[in-house]
Amino acid sequence: MSDLEAALAFLLAQSGHSIVQVFWYTLLFEIPHYLLGFIAVALTVRPPRDGDDRAAEPLPVRRAAGRGAVSIVVVGHNEADAIERCVRSLREQSFNDFEIVIISDGSSDRMPQIAARLASEGLVDKVLATNLRGGKSAGINLAISECSGDIIITVDCDCSYDRFAIENILRPFADPRVGGVCGDIVPRNADASLTARFQAIEYLITISVGKLVGQALNQVVCLSGAFGAFRREALASIGNFDVGGGEDLDVTLRLRAAGWRTAFAGDAICYTDVPVRLWNLVRQRLRWERDAVRLRYRKYRSLLYPRSFRFHPAEALHQWDFLLFSVAASALFPIYTVWLYVEYSTFATVILLSIQIGLLVLDVATLALAALITGRPVFWPNLPYMLGFSIFTSYFMRMVRLVAYIEEWFLFGSTEDNYVPQKVRAIRKW
Amino acid sequence: MTYRILIADDDSMLQEMLKAALEDRGYVIDVAGDGLSALRMLKAGRYDLALVDYHLPEIDGLASARVLNEVLDDADRPRLIAVTADTAGLEQRVGSNEVFDTIVRKPFDIRPFLQLIDQRLNALGSRRAAQASTAVWAEHSLPRRPRAAVVPYPTLRQRTLLEAYFDVTDGPSPDLVLVTEEKGAAEAVALRTRRDAATLPIVDLTGTLGHSADASFVPSNLDTWRDVATAITRFNSRRARLAPTTLLAQDLETQLLAYMFVSGRELEPSIDPSRRSCVLYPGFFPEDRVGQAAERLVRQGLLSKRFVDRFHACVSCQSHRLNVREECPSCRSPDLNEVSIIHHFRCAHQAVETKFVQGPNLICPKCRQHLRHYGSDYDRPGHALVCNACGGSNTEPAVGFACLDCGAHMNGDAVSRRDVFAYALTDAAVTRLATPAASLAPTPAVRTVNALVPATAPAVEPVWKAEAPHATPKRHDSRDMAANPEPPGHAEPIYAKLDPAAMPDALRDELSRLAAAGRLGPAVIAEIRYDARDRIVRQRGDGVFRGLRRLFLENLANALVENGTVFSGDDADFVLLPDLTPQEFAEAAPKLLAGCQELLAQPVGPSVRLVDPQDLAAA
């Protein structure tokens, strides 16, 4: 009898109690998220609608005589190559009654000139270019002070937008409690590399499906900087954007803490390029995760504590959720793996394999769910990659997160992040 | 100019009265009481005018005048006016009319008398000035005072003044055109495009036409006399090299070429903000057409062009007078105000400076902190242009144009651009102008064959040569005109036998058409052969001969215009003149042929025979 057969015999011989003993990590840290997702989607899912249906509903924005009810702000640093495509994609929108304000944040390339030309062509309403980089938050704040819209939409230069994206991101504002809305982010370069493909699947699961779940549970906790819309009144109530990085998470947490609801518009699609090379992805994720830890557990740690004046169950929920399912899960995974090998020696590999197979089934089910609720043809193109994706997220990305958490928790890594200019970091550590 | 007048009269009352009146008018007056002292004074001093009483003591006025005529040169002799109560007596004396310019009867009205004196002295002044100017022109190699056409048409007074320097003429062939007032520039343009005025120098007397004129003239500045003389000489000498058809051309293109050739000037534009186009080409050609005409000539290879400047033109009125402005990209107001942007590091607030300024303090409107430490608390990363009209901000202003003439507004990218070029004659144009076939368009103005031929055209031998008679002369003997001393006008028509096969089809068709219309009466049909053909072909090749023959025929066609038609054949060419008698043709032919080959690089030696129309009809 080979080891494999022995291992399979061992697995099949497990009773309910012993299964918990062996698979406690998976049962504790992985299964609940999947289950929660399926339940939430089952309760709230609606079939995707097309443009004709949407047109029947009035948009919740004041129609001014000219542009003005909605402002789109584009802040970029050295985005000469991307700015024109971004603006032209915005001008292709089904809803076009908005002003565009471009801030060139200390660009040293031709971005200001190209933006000025777009202004002279009438595609852009205002262009302001600074000579010194002030960081994204300062750029957005400058744009907010110069734009006139009641709804302010922030977009990234390197993104392009679905024809109904703006129209759809505006709809949730029909609810006056909503202070901010984010759109769905879809990688447009999934075919560029395996790394990009895995990210496409990841975005599909964590944003397209994940945020829909969040929406059902009032747990949309990060209005992505690539495509977020804000009520001017809501931003004003929290003093607009604060020093970055992770300024999108920062502003979302503060909006929610100030009592505003945040929403997800899954049919407002923003297309973006994700990192193609693995190292770039790692650097990006290290930055994001460091910022998440810094914001959640340093800047806004009071949200965790029931006694804090800021305490609110909904806020405490996502704080604890992140602490448990992201931070603790990442930290415990290596321990669990080592424990498996100590306890079950050669059987451990088979156990890990069986866990992976189980997760693969759940991931495929989630992919099918994503295809169903987004109405996009995402199932078959991604299916061949699901096994790889499952291993990639379980082992590699989890390790990257762990590194980021350790770096931030013990080394204050985010204070060295060049995302924020040195002059600002010198005065605002976090 | 101060004139000196002698009053020779024994009537002291009259003396005093005249003296006072004339001195009032600025003249210098001497007085003589008798004929002898008058004679003495006239001889000794230089007087411009003498008022002489007929009956003077000692020697009478007429005698004094006669003596004076004898002893003084014409140039030194004053004008003499006789003043007498005895006009009848004076007029009876033989020669009194020749001695005195005018005889005035005493007593007289002082006013017309003084006018008479003014007039005489002014005429004298003009004559003297004219003589002086003739001398100055002669120094600059002009044999006489230049004949000047004047625009605008001069007043009598202007004409008198100008006569001192120029021979003012209304006649057909002036040497130059004078522009005496700025408003004359428009008339100069009208004049320029008139036949034969394209090649005259236009001289500026206003001092304001500058570059447009070919020369300017200031009487007190001798350099300008030289400039005018040089221009006239240059225009004259170059004009002589132009074909008559070119000189008389009425199309703007040819006139431009002719002007550029005779003036030796390029069509170099000057900047003139008083015009909508802001550009002025020299030469007084119609402003709105000269550029297009020059471009057509560039396409024909006759002018070359060189970029000079670029203008922006109003989309509605085409004016180049535009106000270029930095404007608000949103509302197009030029009322922009530059303010700096302030970035407060601590709270990431970034806005224009005005939102931070509170009295002497900079206070962050978001977090209410005082900004104290530049570089640590805050910095100024850039600037914004705030529009005072719409309140919008932008870093880059838009460029806009406002038309100063019609007030239209254009965005920078909507305005059209106009390039301005300078033009110069190409070698091809010079070659073409120097040949008689210069007119680029037909010149129907030439009515008769003689009109084209310069009076000085040298006779070209043989100009009217008949061939030896063919086998059987039918009705007339053919005579060799070269051997016949009789003038061609008295010659009998000479008819030659014609081989019908050599006749061009076009001529045959034309003859049948005329015959059918009953108009084939006294028609002249002449055959042209070229004596120099073999020699030219031998020396320079058939191509050169064909070129010369073609040019000769073009000249002939241009010269005949409506009087006849030229048909080119294989060995010989033909001329059909439906309304001319053989005698008339014989008279005109020598000069006509001479004129047509005069400006060819090499004479082709045309020899002409008449063809009997009846012969042709039979053929």
Image (cartoon, grey):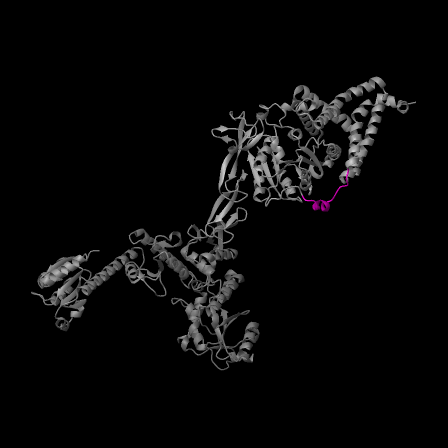
Rendered position, B50 above or below B518: above
Left or right? Give the position of A310 relative to B169.
Answer: right
Question: For this view, does B43 lie left or right of residue A237?
Answer: left
Question: Left or right: where does residue B270 sit relative to residue B160?
Answer: right
Residue occupying the far right of the picture: A1
**Residue A24's x, y, as percent?**
82, 22
Q: Nearer the viewer, residue B209 or A226?
A: A226
- The front one of B449 and A203 is A203
User: Is A54 colored magenta in this rendering?
Assistant: yes
Q: Position of residue A86 (x, y in %)?
A: 64, 39
Residue A96 image-quadrant placement = top right
Depicted B133 relative to depicted B361: above or below: below
Magenta residues? A45-58
Quarter occupied by the N terminus of chain B:
bottom left
User: Residue B601: horizontal and vertical position, in percent?
Assistant: 46, 61
Query: Quick one: which residue is furthest to the top in this view?
Result: A342
Q: Is residue A170 visible?
A: yes
Res A155 visible: no
Report the front residue among A62 and B271.
A62
User: Residue A334 sits in which quadrant?
Assistant: top right
Q: Tell which of B21 and A177 is nearer to you.
A: A177
